[in-house]
Image: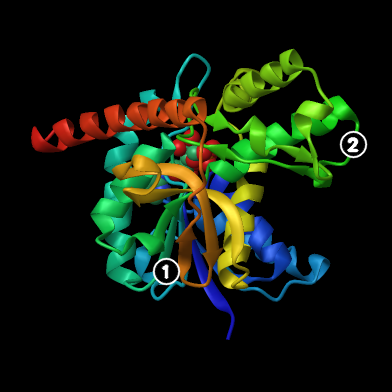
């Protein structure tokens, strides 16, 4: 029997992700959204592409979570997206309320699923979904590191005029302006990037990576990135459904790893059928560690704001 994946939020990120999963034929897909008829219309349109792309996957849309029952994997993209001039943090309390209510429904209908959270501000939303779900930490994690790494790899490949496939890289920390691209772990066909590019150029690329989401928002004017984000989500879906044991940067709840306790932050993990199978602890230099701790502190600030809002009932 095919696996079942539910995508909550049939907007740009959710619908593009659903389409990618359908095209690959990995799972039957259910799209759920609050907007009446939107997930139904988009899913029917995708279903009708099946004969052309050769996919027998069933894809349905609903405004009711009953349709999502017994999903193996649920991807939460519901929420509002950024507009020019907004930071991811400006979305915090609105998206906190949305992801809380979505998570309650998801848990009710799919108590054994794995949840991938995508809504921004990413790390704070993963924390909210994780805490609301009551699931073990291996079953709730977030997509950001693969996207940030993909942006970083794209810029390096363009600069060196080499294949994107030959760039290996790692980005740690929160999905914010203080994310931590690890230059020391960046290589091009096995050659350290520092051998191939001047420090100044690498610094420019690191900075462009940090602003990668903002660069797209400024160009789109309405909404934020979704082609690269949905590709990154699909890579995580593939790692889980095909039990690939991939080593990928994901946002996960840390319990002392990297000196961070009780907070969701991006780190390298091993991803397979049970979700996060292992957190890959690596030794960091003092500077790298300082940057990671500072990024974690930014996430903690948002988590504290969410806690205060919940405590005051706002
Ligand atoms: N339940 C289900 N769906 C909801 C809810 C809810 N409570 N609230 C909003 N939605 C839906 C909207 O109706 C919309 O269709 O979520 C969808 C969001 O889609 P877009 O506005 O197109 O936003 P998108 O670009 O997909 O981004 C979604 O992912 O990358 C992040 O920052 C981004 O937080 C944003 C999220």
- Classify residue 166 as left or right of residue 48: right
Residue under pointer 2: 162
First of labels 1, 2 by sequence position: 1
Q: Image quarter for residue 140?
A: bottom left
Residue 268 position, x and y percent, is 53, 49
Q: How many marks?
A: 2
Q: Residue furthest bottom?
A: 1
- The colour scheme is rainbow
Q: Image quarter for residue 208?
A: top right
Q: Nearer the viewer, residue 5 or 45?
A: 5
Checking the image for residue 68, the label placed there is: 1
Question: Taking the image as drawn, is residue 252 in sight?
Answer: yes
Q: Quadrant of the C terminus?
A: top left
Q: Image quarter for residue 158?
A: top right
Checking the image for residue 254, the label placed there is: none
Q: Report the residue at 35% width, 41% height from top.
A: 259
Q: Nearer the viewer, residue 243 or 88?
A: 243
- Classify residue 65 as left or right of residue 52: left
């Amino acid at each position: 029997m095919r696996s079942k994946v539910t995508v909550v939020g049939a907007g740009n990120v959710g619908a593009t992700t659903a389409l990618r999963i359908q095209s690959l034929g990995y799972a039957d897909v259910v799209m759920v959204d609050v907007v009446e008829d939107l997930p139904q219309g988009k899913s029917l349109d995708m279903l009708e592409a099946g004969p052309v792309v050769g996919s027998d996957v069933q894809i349905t849309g609903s405004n009711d979570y009953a349709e999502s029952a017994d999903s193996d994997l649920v991807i939460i993209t519901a929420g509002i997206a950024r507009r020019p001039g907004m930071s991811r943090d400006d979305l915090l309390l609105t998206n906190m309320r949305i992801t809380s209510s979505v998570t309650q429904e998801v848990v009710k209908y799919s108590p054994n699923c794995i949840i991938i959270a995508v809504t921004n501000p990413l790390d704070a939303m993963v924390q909210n979904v994780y805490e609301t779900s009551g699931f073990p930490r291996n079953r709730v994690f977030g997509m950001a590191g693969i996207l940030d790494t993909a942006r970083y790899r794209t810029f390096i490949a363009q600069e060196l005029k080499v294949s994107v496939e030959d760039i290996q890289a790692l980005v740690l920390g929160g999905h914010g302006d203080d994310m931590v691209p690890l230059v020391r772990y960046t290589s091009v066909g096995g050659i350290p990037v520092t051998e191939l590019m001047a420090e100044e150029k690498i610094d420019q690329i690191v900075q462009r990576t940090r602003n990668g989401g903002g660069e797209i928002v400024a160009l789109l004017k309405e909404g934020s990135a979704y082609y690269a984000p949905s590709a990154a989500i699909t890579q995580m879906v593939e790692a889980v459904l095909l039990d690939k044991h991939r080593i990928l940067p994901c946002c996960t709840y840390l319990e002392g790893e990297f000196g961070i306790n009780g907070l969701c932050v991006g780190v390298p993990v091993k991803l397979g059928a049970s979700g996060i199978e292992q957190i890959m602890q690596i030794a960091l230099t003092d500077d790298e560690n300082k940057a990671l701790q500072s990024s974690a502190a930014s996430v903690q600030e948002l988590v504290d704001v969410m806690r205060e809002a919940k405590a005051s009932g706002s």
